[in-house]
Image: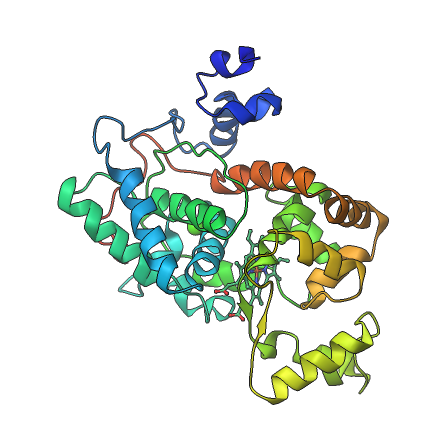
Amino acid sequence: QNAEIKKNSWPYSSWDSFPSIFLSPLSFMEEEEEVGHSNRSLEYDFYRDSCPQAERIILRVVQELNKVNTRVAPALLRLMFHDCFIEGCDASVLLDAAIGIDSEKDSPPNQNLKGFDIIDRIKSEIEKVCPGVVSCADIVALAAREGVVLAGGPFYPLYTGRRNGTLSFRDIATHQLPSPNADLSETLASFASRGFDERETVSLLGGHSIGVIHCKFFQNRLYNFSWTNKPDPSLDTGFLSLLRSRCNNRMNMAYEGPGVDFGTLYYHGLLQGKGILYADQQLMAWVETRIWVRAYASDISLFRRDYALAMMKLSNLRVLTGSTGQVRLHCSKVA
Ligand code: HEM
Ligand SMILES: [Ca+2]
């Protein structure tokens, strides 16, 4: 039963059904060679000697904060997405503006981004036991994974050893973070340029199973879609009324209540014209993505597996390793 696990010295028994290409360190090395960042790759449990408590501290802090605030998990997940999507998982999103640094925090798509305080809190607890060792980029990736698990999503193993960049990319973030009003061809092109196919893109958007979305991001769909003075015809009419009344009462829209399977409502909603963002609902526009919406709506374990693999891939985009980049002392400042 455990042949594959042994081969990869993998400790998670449920992973034996996974395609081995994803478990092989080779897949990470290919990534690095392509961008030429370094000759080393991420490792399983990179901090086993230098800071064996690190991953446990991350889990503990995320668990503690999650108990008192349900917004913690979604904030961490979105933060990881916005870091990794812009120039890789290098903690570029965490840097404050400074001389020579145009902060991604000042990019319009990041205006409502949250979770920076959580990352700082984790970092300071880790600094107490192993100063200057654990990178902010690893903290972001691991904290997001713990958030996903606490929100009812699948666990996925992560390699570590990401280093931090010394730059933040405000203008790149402005142009390259996906727009809530993008149509499917734009969304697919943006994910394809980072190596994600249609299936992976549909599964990643399952991240929209949790969290809150402010009305301004879908306001145009409610009253004046594409300057027609009419609502978006792809919106279910009952759902349209619900969104209108919530937004009129200045309540923002929650994706999925607790207690529901991570992913279930999201994909069922899309089948019924109840996607909140235009970009979400667009997954139903073409057969290439619609088949995966249908598949995930009817087979939640298929979704969980695909989502886990896509999150691993997202968490490993263009990482800096070895002697490239640095380890910061404070996540918002270069060392
Ligand atoms: C086409 C791609 C995407 C677009 C256009 C998009 C856009 C948005 C927008 C506009 C919000 C609302 C922010 C707010 O109201 O404050 C949001 C929230 C969120 N997004 Fe995405 N997103 C995309 C993909 C993803 C992916 C791939 C993930 C994770 C895997 C993700 C995770 C989240 C989460 C968890 C929230 C809720 C944040 C919170 O409640 O604090 N998104 N997204
Ligand atoms: Ca980044």
78 left or right of 100 in image: right
Name the spot of residue 258 as percent of width and height, x first: 54, 60
167 left or right of 216 in image: left
Residue that appears at 52% across and 64% down: 174
Name the spot of residue 58 as percent of width and height, x first: 31, 46
Is 172 drawn above or below residue 300 in the view shown?
below
Name the spot of residue 184 as percent of width and height, x first: 75, 57
User: Which quadrant is home to the N terminus?
Assistant: top right
Q: Quadrant of residue 272?
A: bottom right
Q: Nearer the viewer, residue 275 or 150?
A: 150
Residue 134 seen: yes
Is 320 drawn above or below residue 329 in the view shown?
above
Name the image colouring: rainbow
Q: Quadrant of residue 270?
A: bottom right
Q: Nearer the viewer, residue 39 or 257?
A: 257
Question: Quick one: which residue is furthest to the front in this view?
Answer: 259
Q: Nearer the viewer, residue 323 or 283?
A: 283
Residue 95 seen: no
Ligand 1 found in image quarter = bottom right
Residue that appears at 34% across and 61% down: 116
